[in-house]
Amino acid sequence: MSFPKDFLWGTASAAAQVEGAWDVDGRSPSIWDVAPKGKIKHDDDCHTTCDCYHLYKEDVARMKAMGLKSYRFSISWSRVVPAEGQVNPKGLEYYSDLVDELLAAGIEPMVTLYHWDLPVWVYKKGDWKYESIVEDFKDYVKAVIEALSDRVTMWMTFNEPSVFVNQGYCRGSMAPFEQQDAETVAKITRNVLVSHGEAVKVIRKYAKKTPKISIAIAAKSYTPVDESSEKSIEWARYMTFEGSTIVSANVWWADPCYLGVIPEPLKGAISEEDIKIIHQPLDYFCFNNYQSYNYTDGKSDYSDDGTKLPKNPNIYPGLPRTAMGWAITPETLYWLCKFFHDRYNLPIMISENGMASLDVVSLDGKVHDPVRCDFIVRYLANVKKACEDGIPVLGYQYWSLFDNFEWAMGFDPRFGLIYVDYRDFTRIEKDSVAVYAEIIRTNGENLPSVEVANKR
Ligand code: BGC
């Protein structure tokens, strides 16, 4: 079988990256709103970005016209709980209206509860470093569930915990721009994981409609250098689940949540009691991925955890890369669907995948993005193969519907299917809108074989 009939063809976004309206209707700032000078490229800020807060009706109409079946968005904690103990009805009303608009357009809302925008008041209280943040997170989640769970069923607790912990607290390249010692990072990890587990319990307890819950991990993928060799495939699988000593490893986050296993370096930070909370039943396995990591640096023979990589004959000077410098490696999606399904035995959701390119408005007033058109077809051909192999894949969420605020890189990278002029919020549909809409209309039937799609 190819794509199932009810496959969720969608796009993904995050509150801080698209909403704007940072101080409107009672919202208080998040750590991204107050980034110190010099930390974000060009000193861009996310105060207004795409203004989806005000333009959501128009935006949903575009999604409907494209034929989208799902829309993944996140909730801004500081819009819902702007100060300790205060729930903001206006903030909840915005999300409730957005959900209504989506459902009226026949689009499944998929809600992420935390996509990196910690409220400043929580940060000041002690951030992910204090244990009782778990209680604050639970209160916030409860408020959201009470307001939306009569209509929303698809929930994700966290987006890419490895990325905000690694970049926010180890490398210092994302808010709150800190470089903490290993012990503090382990403690933060414990608090995030326990918050995940407690959030799952809150959702199950208060949801009015039976929820389907997951956590979106940032998947590091290693693909076989030679797909015809069993040894090469097993090397790729090994590497995909290797690296339990580093915060960005898949198993650091996924094994505690899905298998109840504490990775070795976290044994001092996570207790037996904690792991019981963390290990809650989940309904599907969500992953975000953009590239295969054995191509991250064409020159090095080592992965970032120091493991020697076999010589990759597929790396050559001029290998196609996106505007982020990420290698275009469509096979990554096939292998991740396979490896994650083999290990965790749950239906798969690709909660993010996409690319940034140097998009400009051409003289004809349009935005032509041939590389993205090609990218989408190639990557989706690999998802099709996973479906044909019998792996239950529930959906694919392209990152992102709009160009948006790319965190510390500001507005330079453009990932959207829709171009945004941030001066006046004008939207221009890029050529890839039509390509994706046609794939959706035909339920992926005309996608090429992987032999064609993966050739470069
Ligand atoms: C994040 C998004 C980000 C995208 C592109 C993912 O890591 O979840 O917020 O914009 O990748 O970098």
Image (spheres, rainbow, N blue to C red):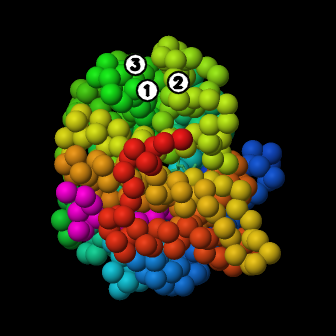
Query: In the picture shown, does residue 62 fall above or below 194?
Result: below
Residue to which mark 3 is pinned: 265
Which amino acid lies under the numbered mark 1 shown in the image of this protein? Val
Is residue 130 among what the camera can see?
no
Which amino acid lies under the numbered mark 3 shown in the image of this protein? Pro
Query: In the picture shown, does residue 142 fall above or below 320?
Result: below
The answer to whether residue 7 is magenta is yes
Residue to which mark 2 is pinned: 313
Q: Earlier in the sequence, mark 2 or mark 3?
A: 3
Task: Report whether 28 appears left or right of 199.
Answer: right
Residue at the image position 36 percent from the left and 64 percent from the top: 446
How far from the left and from the top, in percent, is residue 289? 46, 45
Q: CA distance from mark 1 to mark 2?
A: 7 Å
Residue at the image position 70 percent from the left and 75 percent from the top: 366
Is residue 300 among what the camera can see?
yes
Residue at the image position 23 percent from the left and 63 percent from the top: 4
Q: Which residues are magenta?
A: 1-13
Q: Secondary structure at mark 1?
A: loop
Question: Which image quadrant: the C terminus?
Answer: top right
Task: Report whether 447 appears left or right of 300.
Answer: left
User: Does the beta carbon at disc 1 come under 8 Å from ligand 1?
Assistant: no
Q: Earlier in the sequence, mark 1 or mark 3?
A: 1
Residue at the image position 43 percent from the left and 30 percent from the top: 222
Task: Assess whether mark 2 and mark 1 are in contact (beta carbons under 8 angstroms).
Answer: yes
User: Along the line of sight, which residue is nearer the eye, 161 or 348?
Assistant: 348
Q: Secondary structure at mark 3?
A: helix
Instruction: Using a 10 Å C-alpha cutoff, classify the residue at mark 1 as few (fewer than 14 neighbours), some (14 to 19) or many (20 or more).
Output: many
Residue to which mark 1 is pinned: 225
How far from the left and from the top, in percent, is residue 131? 42, 38
Asked which quadrant contains residue 169, the reply is top right
